[in-house]
Structures are given as structure tokens and as C-alpha cells.
Image (cartoon, rainbow, N blue to C red):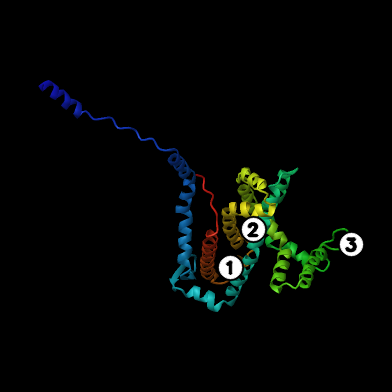
Amino acid sequence: MTNEIKLENQIGNKKTPKKRKIASLDKRKARVGWLFVLPFLIGFAFVYLPIVGESFWLAFNQLTIVKGGGYNLNFVGFENFVYAFNTDANFTQTLITGIGELIFQVPAILLFSLFMAVLLNQKMAGRAAFRAIFFLPVVLATGIMESIEASNILGSYMGESSGIDDGSGGSAASSIVSAIDIEQLFSNMKVGQELVTYVVGIINDIYGIVNRSGVQMLIFLAGLQSISPAIYEACKIDGATGWETFWKITFPMISPMILVNAVYTIIDSFTTETNTVMTYISTVASKTNGEVISTAMSWIYFLIVVLILLAVAGIMSMYVFYQRKD
């Protein structure tokens, strides 16, 4: 009896081996994802953040150049911000103009890119070639082409009376300007003057709209191709028209892409070199003691962009449809 009790105690004192925890597939994917973004995080923390902090501090100071090299900073509080709003009247007017251009351009870019994505998603000969053609402006709008567009060389030719000779005895300027005759068409239809002005502005800016719609078109294409064909087959069996299928199936299913493209388009429009506000801030920076004033203007501009993004994302998020996978 005593030996049995000792044997039981020895068995009870033995430590059971611990089972090795195996990370789940999702956790391992998350670790790999963090590994990929680690170089960006390091650069953001040690390179970008110090520059942002220095810029923020510079906006609250007055810059004084020291003879022999260097500079001194004198803290002046919100004086630079007050100067940007109260003293420099052009800055406020430029902000209003830039936001007005955004209101006109963003819906037009989204509508055009969605329209082209729906067309290019159809089965047709040479579909890949057409997709490449419509994305080509995004590739060309970099480097030297972006500089040419920023200098508005094409616009200067359009402004000349002779325009660009197209070889037919006429000019490209006259043919493009004749598109504004749509104003007369809308006037005969007795629509509001605001709609007339909007459509005419869109026609005049068609080059810029096509130039900035390539990325959005690809995102919409990815969203359209992620919709199950079985859903469209069920709609066709039920007798739904193409118009009903678009508004009841396609549009809700790609609503998350509409939100993504809206945010991307707003940021892209506010940060492009041809943006009026960016151009004006660069002009102010080149003036005497313009470094601190332009820095304050940049932070004002940044906060306005953030507020617009929050408002747009908040409003559109209420109408976004997310398909459940379960």
C-alpha cells in the first residue's frame, strides 16, 4: 500500500510537457505584412516626422537671417496665421477658388472613370488594348509631361487667335472653343445657369479629367470584376433590365470603391502641382520672409483638406454597402 502511494506521488510530481503554440495563418500573414511596411515606418519615424515637426514649429516663429550664415527663430504665436487670413487677402480668395475647383472636378472625375470602367468591363475585342490606352495618360503625366502641363504650354497655344494649325486651314483652338456652343443648347432647354456653367467647365477641362481618371478607372475595374457573375445571371433570369441591374446590383457593390476613389481624387487634386493653392503658396515662399508665412499657409491648407476628407468620408460611409462573406 505504501509503495502504491509513493508511485502515485511520483507520477503526480512529473510536469506535463507544454504544448507549443502555433500561430494562426492570419497572425503569420500579419507579421509578414508588418515586415513589408517596416522600411516605411522607419523612414516615417526618423526622416518624415522630424521634418513635419520642424515645419510646424517654424509656422509659429519669425525667421531672422544671421550675417555670416544661419538664422534665428523668434516665437510669435499665431501671428503668421493671422497674417495669412487678415493681411494677405489673396490667400483667402485662392483657397475659395481651389475648393470651388475641387467641387467641379471630383464628381466629374468619378463619373468619367466609372463610366469608362463599366464600358471596359464588357466583353469586346481588344479590351486589354483599350484599357492600356485609357491608362496611358497617367504614365505620361509624370516627369517632363507634368512640368509641361504645369507651365500651361497647351493653354497658351489655345489662347492665341491662330491656335495650333491642324493642317486643314483651321485651328485647333477654334474647334475646341466651338464645344462651348453646348451653352446655347442648354439655354434652349431652359435649364439653370449653374448647370450650364458646370457642363461648359467640364468640357473645357476634359483633358485634365481624362488625365486624372486612370487610377480611379483601374480601381473601379477591380471592383466590377469582383462581383460574382451568378448575381447578374439571376437578375437576367428575373427579367431585370440593364439599367435596373446597374442601380440595384453594380452600383451598391462598388460603393466602397467610390469612397476610396473620392478620397484619392480629393488628395490628388489638392496636392497636384497645377493646383492654384499650391502654386500660390510656392510663390509666397519665394518672397522676403516668405518661408514662415508660406509654412503657416501650408498648415492651414492641410487642416482644411483634412476637414474636407473627414466630411466626405463620413457622409459617404453612411451609404456604402459592404458585402458579407459569411
The answer to whether mark 1 and mark 2 are in CB contact below 8 A is: no
Q: Position of residue 322 (x, y in %)?
A: 53, 52
Q: Nearer the viewer, residue 315 or 107?
A: 315
Compared across the picture, whether 322 is left or right of 235 comes to: left
Is residue 142 visible from the viewing direction of this image? Answer: no
Location of mark 1 (residue): 281
Is residue 219 visible from the viewing direction of this image? Answer: yes
Q: Nearer the viewer, residue 39 or 17?
A: 17
> Residue most toward the left?
2
Compared across the picture, whether 162 is left or right of 104 comes to: right
Question: What kind of residue is marked 1?
Answer: Ile
Q: Nearer the viewer, residue 26 or 96?
A: 26
Nearer the N terminus, badge 3 or badge 2?
A: 2
Nearer the N terminus, badge 1 or badge 2?
A: 2
Compared across the picture, whether 49 is left or right of 288 comes to: left
Q: Position of residue 273 (x, y in %)?
A: 63, 61
The answer to whether mark 1 and mark 3 are in CB contact below 8 A is: no
In the image, which is nearer the foreground, mark 3 or mark 2? 2
Location of mark 3 (residue): 169
Circle 3 SS class: loop
Q: Position of residue 259 (x, y in %)?
A: 57, 57
Query: Mark 2 packing: few (<14 Cα in 10 Å), some, or many (20+)?
Result: many
Query: Mark 3 packing: few (<14 Cα in 10 Å), some, or many (20+)?
Result: few
Label disc, if present, on residue 110 of the rendered structure: 2
Q: Position of residue 154 (x, y in %)?
A: 75, 62
